Image (tube, helix red, strand yellow):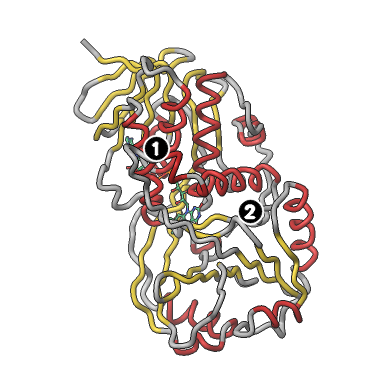
Amino acid sequence: MNESFDVVIVGGAVIGAAAAFFLAEALPRSARVLVLEADPSYTTCATTRSLASIRHQFSTPENVRMSMFGTAFLRQAGERLAVDGAAPAIGFVEAGYLFLATPAGWPTLERNHAVQRAEGAEVALLARAALAARFPWLTTNDLAGGSLGLSGEGWLDAHALMHGFLKKARSLGVQVRAGRVTELCREGARIRAVRLADGGEIACGTVINAAGTGAAALARTAGIALPVQARKRCVFHFRSPEPAPGCPLVIDPTGLYFRPEGQGFVCGIAPPEAEDPECFDFDVPPQWFEERLWPLLARRVPGFEAARLVSSWAGHYDVNVLDHNVILGAHPEVENLLFANGFSGHGLQQSPAIGRALMELVVHGGFRSLDLGAFGWARVIEGRGVREVNVV
Ligand SMILES: Cc1cc2nc3c(=O)[nH]c(=O)nc-3n(C[C@H](O)[C@H](O)[C@H](O)COP(=O)(O)OP(=O)(O)OC[C@H]3O[C@@H](n4cnc5c(N)ncnc54)[C@H](O)[C@@H]3O)c2cc1C
């Protein structure tokens, strides 16, 4: 006889794991929740390859508030996720983000600043002189100034957070299994069961699509076109003999970003649109660091002229090609299939807020803590995106 679960979560990386944790906390112990993960080594998922940073500096109020909840959660992660007294070491470093702007970009920074302050984010606009005084290792002569996160922004260990969610969820009764879902078995307006690669079927009350870059293929099996594509992003780890004291995560007007990591720094830049097709390989383009990044790094921080590349890796963003924001909740045609896909590079920091939101959709049938209705399917179907200016 087929097994049956109240909730089946497809994908057990940070989004699926966060959903499992919040559901396990909220549902009675008799509820049956299952996480199915195709690759329990988690070698190539976005969570593992993430830069794992969190910022409050978005242009959309909902994105600011999701990350602010993320920070509050990360600060308590030790207590919330401890199992038998053992807390996950998520290594949250609150060193801030610094968005730099040329005179042309300054009005946008000011507009975003107003949105962020209205949501309660602790951010400060620094004019060029203040910027130069605070970060003397930075070249500022082409800049109007920058926007600095004063608290709550920084970076963490993504893998530790994901496993912390999973371990706690397991301790509360969630089952986590290896298994690739090959089909969502749809009957009319419902998903009856999920089919696995070994041919088995598991009946379900609700299904959550947390399959990252696998989400569109999964949705297709239920006849739903999800506008999410895998796009390659490369990260480079380098050493610099010159220190950059108090370095936050810096976002340059060119799109270059860098931040400290261990004894060195990590950096990257999104490729231009024309060089950014859907892509499933993990090859790092040769010469990318020397030819594209190094000149930008040295221009912004003269001390990086002597930077030495240590290692590099590629990962995939799950890009919502409509508007670079999450698609959250049920599609109007299928009532018991919840989506949480298309994070486009900011899903790690949103995982606590999204996990909580998915729990509220399952338990209450609607959002309770934070209204994320703007990120539902309606805007996708109508083709009107939620515009987020600060996509990195
Ligand atoms: C280079 C890089 C840098 C990033 N930097 C940041 C950052 O600084 N801050 C931030 O917030 N975010 C960042 N992100 C984005 C963030 O990592 C992702 O948004 C987030 O990890 C998405 O989590 P997920 O669980 O949805 O997807 P994933 O981590 O991709 O996991 C999806 C999981 O689903 C499984 N799966 C897929 N299909 C199936 C199936 N059919 N059956 C069963 N299992 C399946 C996969 O095996 C995988 O484990 C970055 C991403 C990359 C690649």
Q: Could you tell me how many numbered marks the image carries?
A: 2
Q: Can the viewer see residue 216 in this picture?
A: no
Residue 126, horizontal then vertical, whole percent:
75, 71
Q: Amino acid at mark 1?
A: Ala
Q: Amino acid at mark 2?
A: His
Q: How crowded is the residue under tag 2: few (<14 C-alpha within 10 Å), some, or many (20+)?
A: many
The residue depicted at 66 percent of the width and 32 percent of the height is: 371
Task: Tell whether circle 1 marks a residue whose Cβ is less than 8 angstroms from ligand 1.
Answer: yes
Residue 149, horizontal then vertical, whole percent:
65, 62
In the image, farthest residue toward the top: 1
**Would you place residue 47 above or below residue 218 in this image?**
below
- The front one of 23 and 341 is 23
**Would you place residue 103 above or below residue 385 in this image?**
below
Q: Earlier in the sequence, mark 2 or mark 1?
A: 1
Residue 367 sits in quarter: top right
Q: What residue sits right under mark 2 in the picture?
A: 56
Residue 279, horizontal then vertical, whole percent:
40, 54
The residue depicted at 73 percent of the width and 64 percent of the height is: 124
- The front one of 244 and 84 is 84
The residue depicted at 74 percent of the width and 78 percent of the height is: 130
The residue depicted at 49 percent of the width and 42 percent of the height is: 351
Residue 383 sits in quarter: top right
Q: What residue sits right under mark 1 in the picture?
A: 17
In the image, farthest residue toward the front: 85
Residue 336, horizontal then vertical, whole percent:
48, 19
